[in-house]
Image (cartoon, coloured by chain):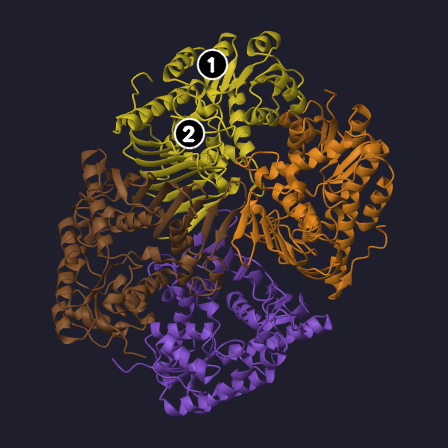
Chain colours: A yellow, B brown, C purple, D orange
């Protein structure tokens, strides 16, 4: 057996810890962890059992022989850290959205197009086994023409007017709240299962709590949207009804899509992520679970447990990282098209996001500007 | 016991038969049934065990002493039949949408405003016991401010390109297909549970099968929408994401709404109509069933069975007609505000529908024109 | 159209009212209603809109020209009323359990074997459309050999120690509580879908609340079982695990069965009575809803609504009575084997009940004594 | 940070791999892996990225400085390997059932009672977060008196007559099939949530396929039970209805329990392991998800992810091993009562199993012989 790959993980919040766990499941060593301060870095290393922490990415890059850098920080840091990691010759795995602005995303896309480095964005929803099954069926033509997708992400993170966080600060999170956060996942997922890019959008934003008091006292004024409803037209002709809400009591986090297609209907819901519903008209509906015995050939690699073993959230990262590190493990010349979303998809997401923001502001339909995504 | 009320039922299709059954459950006698032809009228009377059929409404009005007329015909006939029934001094219960055009609806509204006759439109979804529970909670302020509603009606009636029917013919069904049909239910329901009228809409229509061959051979060209996605702003400030689809394999007919509100979330789905989900953030979510032991005071009248007894589709009509005939049974002077939707709500539905159609055509936001609904 | 059939309904409690409603849906006239006292009889007739009430069955039999008598009273009255009705030449429809004792059941069985009168017992669970689908598949051999059935009825009627009622009094309800009440439904249902009679049973009874205070004060001592768990061997070789509980908070009333068979698994649950689950190993599981488009030929008659129309509890009685009155409507010589359970099945249920009681008392396996059910 | 713990994993089948993954999530190094043959050991080490494999446990014990040994082999090897590991001074984590015979279990129990070594049995179902929530509520008295539990484990592993495996061979798996396999999980789980040991049992075994042809040709004769239904009386007075089936098409593996208790009902189902149903009679039912915001104090340690993060099968092993290695990490004198099941619970399981087997053979109630479990 060759040596294990080694990764630097920047960010030690909830999602940074998920990266550490998912790396371990793929037998990748965590070379160093970097948190928002040295104190928290030391604590995180201790809690996670990681042998090294660094005060910043530059130090970590200089002091370790890591193969890859994982960026799980607030959005504002994504671009700078990705550039630093790329310039240090590392592979880069970045959380979503790719960047805070479209310009930054364009830059990262340009830097990676011919660099030979592996780059990925953590649209982990793709890697629930049953989502891969839907994507495989779509690619194989099993769904037939997709007529319409109804898709939503709802969560409770901003439900109360006392809820706060860095996502509310445009300087850190960018000008959009839910569209950037849960919306980036949603649009990536929708395009995957519809099998088409977004052509144009008509968006309606609401700020349910324009004044928030996260500390119970100090008022902060919020411009960004905590609710977004969006009409979508895909290039394929499919239509979409998109709903995003971070003020949804009862749903810690739920992604759901429903597809009406020529051959059948499809529904998947992350709150029951181990069930895939296939709708028929003249014969009984079907429900699949993640089991190699009922999977399509194109998704079999994602049913890597027996059906008796139900996957969770962590497995979506495990499978995403598995695919990424398999790619890293190949010689550059031998790398097939990635099976995971890359900075190209991250940039695409930023272009859709921009169109959504422009539409909501203008109260009109806006086309996504795909011109630069050659 | 006073004599039973007597009703004429026009229309002997699936929904006409539901009217007959729901009347019998309310101990209302069916005085006559009228179908699309004398032959079918005779057959329907026979099958349904109704003692009399008539070739047309005029004959029935002249030959029976009915108290009320139920109109369950294609849309094109609603206005004329309602006028005839009203002029004959009958109470009128009409299927949705109220009419084929807004002008017809305005006329019916005008005719009934001071006529003293009871008039109703069959938005039966309101009368699922658990929908009444949501409405009661909304009225009582238990939900708090409603932030957003996600609501859809999906069915499989037009899924295949060989599906046809009178709803596709603008001369019979009107210029809209799903917006008029399932959309009229949806907007009524949404306004009820949100507690606000629609202010403006932005709609996207699709015609999945612009050419259909209902007989397998002859092509008919369809302009109307079999899919409609709609953004909604309510007068209260609440937002809505609406999806309508009649091309949804796997769902014979499903109405679902999800509300995000200040006090909790709410979800109801007609495919599991005996469950009402109430979402919380800091305590467990709740699930209610139709049971007087767990109902709000304002909805208790609609939990008229013990919890062990699950209601079905027919019960929604049973309860709707119960309320209507209770009103009919009162002296005109003693009638309280109706607990059921009237021609006013039918006209309101037509005004919303018109705004949706205009928005889809214009590709822009359109305000509902409430000026005439004084 | 010939004249409507006419029925006397004895019993005006919750279930008596269900009979009245289900009769009306079948266009059967209620000739008279009889309650537990003249005062309540008058009230019931008034509330239900029935034109006549009688102080007792004899008066009703003498004063009306009813075709049939429906018995929906406490168990102790079943035998006497059925005898009176039979002697008056009426068809008889009786609630479950057939009688309070096996001897009474044997007598009713003997009286009806050659009488030419239609007799039925209200095992309404059979008449949920999807239960008919399971039975049709079983009869057709589609399930293959049935290996095992897990089946339960749980309700909350006796959950609190303050709950009371006539079922607790052996003089009125008989010596068994849950086995007689919900158990009679369960065993009938199990035999139907397994396709075999019960051969032997091993039962465990518990009395969760041996002392109850229904009025909050006076203690009554209860010997009967409010919980019963039962092992079952069917004549076919199939095995059963049966659970009955009337102390189940959260379930107003739930019947559920799960079958493991050679060709697939089957699950039906009355709390989601519009879904039938079919389990497979090497292909996706299936979910049916009540829709003629997905029903077996042998069950098509019970999918008499389109799939968009979900049936409720009342529909199970509607379909049961439909089949009964169709039989009544036929000349005696032309009557096929009944599609509904008769006094034969009622007697069979009493024989199984007796074996269960004997087993629980003796702490041993007991065979059902089928000798007299020739 | 102190050095990582190190573990030897014996067994490289599906469940051995789960051990490796769950160890990694707890930052425990896998010192060596041992499979059923050297060839498979090398392959397993390679696939799993484990740096060392050994041909047998003795070699591994002699060649590594492991702290603990994980035994994930067929039952016949459990006793010998546990003895070897204990004699080598290692902590031991063993798969269920503890041994093949009660005598072997008694021996292991005796060896570990005062040895100071940590010992554990992998009843992982306990470690679903929501199962811990039920156990915490039970311990805290929140459920009130438990009246009855209905509990089942159903799977499809032996559904077809062509299914085989070592569990069918009494020499390897022991004389019982489903009772030993899924039944050992079930009884441990039931006692945990009921809060009482089993007092007596009445069991019914079936061998659905007494002749099997695993290779499609050679007949093997099977005596063991592939279906077991069992009546249970707990020492607390609670009753149980237990069903085990390995011939259940449609369920790769499902554990479900339903509790009727004095304060509420409780249902948990491994197929929707992220939902805990709490049943009430006079207020709405509740549904919990694994979220620290809704967990009891006594279970908070098992809600170590935010509610937005749904746990899977792997997490149950992660949390089980977390508790075990925390115990290992404490000085012997400082170790509290284990929060995980030990060889004591493993031995208890064998005693219950013996009573079940004796009952099925004798066709009578059998008391569990707790005399030796002092």
Residue A30 appears in the picture as rendered: no
Q: Is mark 2 on a helix, strand or loop?
A: strand
Q: Is mark 1 on a helix, strand or loop?
A: helix
- The residue depicted at 25 percent of the width and 51 percent of the height is B181
Viewer-nearest residue: D296 or A69? D296
Q: Quadrant of the N terminus of chain B?
A: bottom left
The part of the image, by quadrant, that contains residue A17 is: top right
* Residue C20 placement (x, y as % from top left): 39, 75
Distance, label 1 to label 2, CA atoms, is 54 Å
Tag shown at residue A211: 2
| A327 sits to left or right of D354 | left
* Residue B183 placement (x, y as % from top left): 27, 48
The part of the image, by quadrant, that contains residue A104 is: top left
- The residue depicted at 45 percent of the width and 77 percent of the height is C12
Viewer-nearest residue: D345 or B163? D345
Mark 1, chain letter?
Answer: A
| Residue B355 to residue C334: above or below | above
| Residue C83 to residue B178: above or below | below
Tag shown at residue B349: none
- The residue depicted at 77 percent of the width and 62 percent of the height is D366
The part of the image, by quadrant, that contains residue D200 is: bottom right
Mark 2, chain letter?
Answer: A
| C205 sits to left or right of A239 | right
Residue on which the image places disc 1: A333
Q: Of the two numbered discs 1 and 2 on the same chain, state the one appearing first in sequence.
A: 2
Q: Which of marks 1 and 2 is in front?
A: 2
């Amino acid at each position: 057996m060759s040596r294990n790959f080694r990764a630097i993980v920047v960010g030690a919040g909830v999602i940074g810890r998920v990266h550490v766990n998912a790396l371990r499941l793929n037998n990748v060593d965590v070379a160093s962890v970097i948190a928002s301060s040295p104190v928290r870095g030391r604590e995180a290393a201790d809690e996670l059992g990681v042998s090294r922490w660094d005060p910043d990415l530059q130090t970590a890059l200089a002091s370790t022989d890591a193969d890859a850098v994982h960026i799980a920080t607030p959005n504002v840091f994504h671009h700078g850290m990705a550039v630093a990691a790329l310039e240090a010759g590392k592979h880069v795995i970045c959380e979503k959205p790719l960047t805070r602005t479209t310009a930054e995303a364009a830059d990262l896309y340009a830097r990676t197009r011919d660099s030979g480095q592996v780059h990925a964005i953590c649209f982990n929803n793709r890697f629930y086994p049953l989502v891969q099954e839907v994507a495989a069926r779509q690619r194989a033509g099993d769904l037939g023409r997709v007529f319409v997708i109804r898709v939503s992400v709802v969560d409770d993170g901003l439900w109360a007017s006392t809820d706060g966080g860095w996502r509310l600060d445009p300087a850190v999170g960018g000008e959009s709240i839910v569209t950037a956060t849960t919306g980036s996942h949603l649009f990536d997922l929708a395009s995957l299962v519809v099998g088409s890019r977004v052509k144009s959008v008509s968006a309606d934003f609401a700020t349910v709590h324009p004044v928030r008091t996260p500390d119970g006292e100090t008022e902060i004024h919020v411009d960004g949207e905590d609710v977004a409803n969006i009409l979508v037209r895909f290039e394929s002709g499919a239509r979409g009804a998109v709903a995003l809400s971070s003020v949804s009591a009862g749903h810690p986090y739920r992604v759901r899509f429903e597809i009406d297609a020529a051959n059948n209907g499809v529904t998947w819901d992350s709150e029951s992520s181990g069930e895939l519903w296939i709708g028929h008209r003249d014969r009984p509906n079907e429900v699949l679970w993640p089991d190699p015995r009922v999977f399509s050939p194109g998704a079999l690699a994602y049913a890597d447990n027996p059906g008796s073993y139900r996957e969770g959230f962590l497995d979506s990262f495990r499978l995403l990282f598995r695919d990424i590190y398999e790619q890293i493990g190949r010689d550059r010349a031998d790398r097939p098209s990635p099976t995971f979303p890359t900075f190209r998809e991250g940039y695409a997401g930023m272009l859709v996001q921009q169109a959504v923001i422009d539409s909501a502001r203008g109260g009109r339909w806006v086309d996504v500007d795909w011109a630069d995504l050659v």
